[in-house]
Image (spheres, helix red, strand yellow):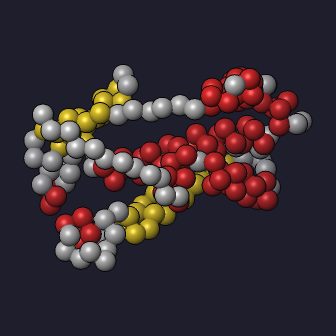
Amino acid sequence: MTSQAAESSTALGRIIAATREAVTADRANGRVVFQASATAHDAVASTVSLGQYQVEVDEPPPLGGESKAPNPVEYYLASLLSCQIVTWRFWAEKLGIAVDDITAHAEGDLDVQGFFGFDDNVRSGFQEVRVVISLTGPETPERYRELQQAVDQHCPVLDLTRNATPVTTRVQLS
């Protein structure tokens, strides 16, 4: 079965095929703008609006919060893992590789000396993140390595970490 034939046989396949058709017709159809807004409350907490959704963000007590919600770096790990799972599913479909079940786990090492400015030689973010993907399925280890290479190349949140993304910040005084 070719990857395009596999693309049209399932819901994910139909999404891939329809997106391919739309982007082929007009490359501008491939560009999407995502937005988020945050409002501060309490000492270090915030409410983030993401389209129709709102999520709460807080910090643990050692960082001035009340642990009422995950902290920003935990949300990063959640974003990475959920994006990994989506990318594994889409690319398994695209490559015709069967995956019965997939789970993901991540942990990251962060030295708060960078955040607090105690040592300017220490990064403010994670020094390292480790991801473990657990799969079940009938394919050979070689096929799953092929799939992993595709995921590593195409996962948007992983790309944010591995490649520099320009970020501009503008302060607006009211």
Residue at 10% in and 41% down: 42
What is the quadrant of the C terminus in the image? Answer: top left
Query: Is 35 left, or right, of 96 in this rendering?
Result: left
x and y percent of residue 7 in the render?
Answer: 78, 30
Residue at 16% in and 58% down: 63
Residue 101 visible in the displayed image = no
Residue at 34% in and 53% down: 73
Tell me if residue 174 comes above or below residue 87 in the rendering.
Answer: above
x and y percent of residue 86 in the render?
Answer: 58, 39
Residue furthest to the left:
43
Query: Is 78 left, or right, of 146 in this rendering?
Result: left
Tell me if residue 28 comes above or below residue 168 in the rendering.
Answer: above
What is the quadrant of the N terminus in the image? Answer: top right
Tell me if residue 164 comes above or below residue 99 in the rendering.
Answer: below
Query: Is 167 left, or right, of 86 in this rendering?
Result: left
x and y percent of residue 155 in the render?
Answer: 59, 48
x and y percent of residue 125 in the render?
Answer: 35, 62
Give the total of numbered labels.
0
Residue 136 visible in the displayed image = yes
Q: Residue 127's image quarter?
A: bottom left
Q: Residue 51's image quarter?
A: top left
Query: Is 129 left, or right, of 169 in this rendering?
Result: right
Q: Nearer the viewer, residue 10 or 125?
A: 125
Q: Residue 129's image quarter?
A: bottom left
Residue at 48% in and 32% down: 33
